[in-house]
Image (cartoon, grey):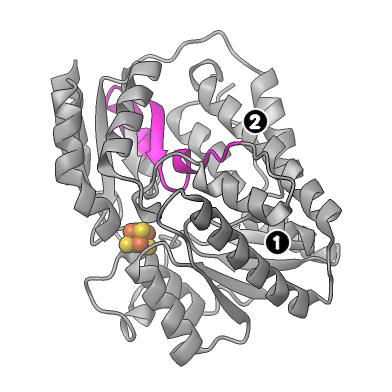
Amino acid sequence: MDSIEIPKRIETINSFKAQGGKVAAVLPIHYSRALFRAFDILPVEVWGPPEVEASYGGVHLQAYVCSIVHNALSFLKKGGLEIADFILVPHACDSLQGLGSILLDFVKPTQTVAPLYLPRGKRTEDKQFLADEFRALARQLSNLTGKEPGDDKLLECIEREEQADLLLADLYRNRTGLGLDNLSFYRLIRSREYLPAEQFTELAQTALEKHSARNPNGIPILLSGIVPERMEVLKAIEELGGFVVADDFACCGRRLYPKGNERDPFLRMAERIINAPPDPTRGNSIDERAEFLINLAQTYGAKGVIFYELKFCEPELFDLPNLRNSLKQAGLNSVHIEVDIKDPLSNQVITRIGAFLEILE
Ligand code: SF4
C-alpha cells in the first residue's frame, strides 16, 4: 500500500456543514475535540497554514514571533477562516496568548473568539483547573448553538474520540508494517486535525487491515518539534536514506492522548490531556522529556533524533541544549534544524539532514 485516499479538509468541512453542523477553527496545541462534537461543531485545526501571504499578520506582530502565529493571523485577515463559526486559541505559549489578545482586542473577527488556559503541571488541582476551563468553554458553545448536551452525550463523544486515539496509537505502533512511505503516513496521521473521529477511525482501520509485510529500508530516525512543515521534508528524508520510525511532534506524537478513567466528562477531558506524552507547553520537565525520547528511540530502534524546530519557538528552544545533552549522554545523536513554515524546503535543510544521516550510518 503506497498511499491511502484521505478526504480533503474543505470537502470535510462542507459536508459537515451541509448536515447542519458548525465549524470551529482551533489553534495549536491541546483542547478537547469531544467537547466541540457534543455541540455538533467540527473542530478544524489551524497549524499555520504554510502557504499564506504572511505579511497581513506582520502589521500586528513582532518579527520575532513564530511563523505559525504570523501565518494564522494572515490567513484570518485574508478571509481564510470565514467558514468557521468559532475560533479557539489555546494558550500554549506566549505567542499564542498574544494572538488571542490581538484577536479579542484589535482584529475582532466576526466569530466568537475564546481562549483556553492550560495548566503547567499534573497535580489534582491542574486537572480541576482544566476541567473548569472546559466547563467555561462549554457555556460559550452553548450560547453559540443553543444546545445543552448532558453528561451522557459528552461521555459518548469522549469515548468516540478515545476510540479514534487508540487507533491512532495503533497506526504509530504498526507504522513500519503499513507499507506507507513517510509522507503518506503523516498525511494519514494529520487528517486527525480535521476529520470527524468516526471518519478517522474508518480510515485508520482500513490502513491497519491492509497491513503489509514489506519492511521499509532506511536509517531509523525519530523526529521532534512542533509540526512537520513543509511536509516535503518527509519525502526528502526518505530520499536521503532515512525512515521516520517515531515522532514527538506537538501536532502528532505528543497528542497520543490516553483513555481516561474519570466518570465526570469534564475531568475526563482534562485527565486525557494531562496524561499525554510530555510537552514543554504543558510544563513537563526536560528530564521527563529526555526519558520519554530515549524510551521512544529504544522502543522503535531509532538511531538519532532530528529536532525539526520552528524559528522563534521559545518553549521548544529553551529546552533544546539540555535536552540534547541528556540524549547525548544516553548515546543518542541529534541535530537541530530550524525552519520557517513560510519558506519552501531549502537545499540547506536537505544537506544538513543528509549529513546527519551519514553520521548515523
Ligand atoms: S511554534 Fe512554538 S511559539 Fe509558535 S505557536 Fe507553536 S508553541 Fe508557540
Disc 2 target residue:
167
Dot 1 amino acid type: Phe
The disc labelled 2 sits on which kind of residue?
A: Leu
Estimate the spatial distance between the alpha carbons at disc 2 and disc 1, rounded to whole Å. Answer: 20 Å
Label whose residue precedes the other's in the sequence (2 or 1): 1
Residue projecting furthest to the top: 213
Picture coordinates of residue 183, whole percent (x, y): 46, 35
Q: Secondary structure at mark 2?
A: helix
Above-or-below relation of 66 to 216: below
Residue beneath disc 1: 36
Residues packed near mark 1 inside 10 Å, few (<14), some (14 to 19) or many (20 plus): many
Q: Is residue 257 magenta?
A: yes
Q: Quadrant of ligand 1?
A: bottom left
- Screen quadrant of the N terminus: top right
Dot 1 falls on a residue whose secondary structure is helix
Task: Give coordinates of residue 95: x percent, y percent.
Answer: 34, 70
**Residue at 50 percent of width and 41 percent of height:** 276
